[in-house]
Image (cartoon, helix red, strand yellow):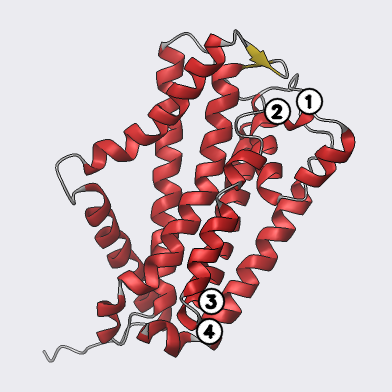
Amino acid sequence: MIATHVPRSQLAVTLGVWRALILREAEAKLFASRVSWVWVLLEPVLHVGYLIVLYSVIRVRTVGDLDTAMWLMIGLQAYFMFRKTTDRVSTAANENSALYAYRQVKPIDTLIARAFLEGAMNLLATALLAALLLMMGHVLYPDFPLGLLQALFGMWMLGIGLGMTISAATSLVREIRLVLQVVLRPLYLISGIMFPIASLSKPWREVLMLNPVAHGVEMARMALSRGYEGVPETDPGYLFLSATILVLAGLVLQLRFAMQIAEQ
């Protein structure tokens, strides 16, 4: 019997490429050194830990009727879902340039693979942090679990869109990355990670809530407890509109400058 070779569809090839890239990225991220996988989990623990200690010193037990530890943890993890996805996606094309020798691999494939890996790792870190805080006596049973997933998904999409946009822009002008790093650095402070935006007067709240990241952070916290007194201006539609615009802009730029991105 003569064996016949059935060519794979384009979708099957693309999914195979994504699977291989995700496994490659996971191996590089978790096993680059003996402590790589430990740091992936330890970094969010340290961030949450020092903020909990800070709030304990100033004797703040609740924020907006929500346990302070949970308020800090979920806000940080929502922010990290956005920021880490942005950082990793924006550098994926450049760091995987050697793979473009294979005609099946395109720059956008490396971006998508990193985005999926970062999203999965962040969800795992959030679950482990929640388990750790439960062991310490902090109760975490989200009143709106789907709302929490919605908030994290919105932040993930926002990170993908911004990451793709930065990746394409830096392939044309490398200095853009340095400028964006300076611009994005204050996001940690103005997104309500360390202080409740709801405590500010309305004019200041409205200014800070122009930042879509702040909406995602507040959405995640509001999903934990129906009694949480969040920022009145929080709007899921604004977060997802911003994410959609960035994703579409990123895709257009990736397709338009695919050659320059592959050669950078």
Q: Residues within 10 Å of mark 2 (few under 14, many from 20)?
A: some
Q: Is residue 158 left or right of residue 163?
A: right
Q: Which residue is mark 4?
A: 255
Dot placed on the residue nearer the N-terminal end, 2 or 4:
2
Q: Return the x and y of residue 221 as percentages of the image width and height.
A: 65, 30
Q: Residue at x 25, y 36 (%)?
A: 38
Q: CA distance from mark 2 to mark 1?
A: 6 Å
Q: Is residue 3 left or right of residue 135?
A: left
Q: Which residue is mark 3?
A: 169
Q: CA distance from mark 1 to mark 3?
A: 37 Å
- Type of amino acid under label 3: Ala
Q: Residue at x 42, y 47 (%)?
A: 120
Q: Return the x and y of residue 222 as percentages of the image width and height.
A: 70, 30
Q: Up-down: is 126 above or below 182?
A: above
Quick check: marks 1 and 4 in contact, CB under 8 Å? no
Split into 4 quadrants, where in the image is the C terminus? bottom left
Q: Residue furthest right?
A: 202
Quick check: marks 2 and 1 in contact, CB under 8 Å? yes
**The disc label shown at residue 196, or none:** 2
Q: CA distance from mark 2 to mark 4?
A: 40 Å
Residue 140 visible in image: no
Q: CA distance from mark 3 to mark 4?
A: 12 Å
- Type of amino acid under label 4: Leu
Q: CA distance from mark 1 to mark 4?
A: 44 Å
Q: Which residue is mark 1?
A: 199
Residue 77 visible in image: yes
Q: Residue at x 77, y 50 (%)?
A: 210
Q: Residue at x 55, y 52 (%)?
A: 156
As helix, strand or loop, the secondary structure at mark 2 comes to loop
Dot placed on the residue nearer the N-terminal end, 1 or 4:
1
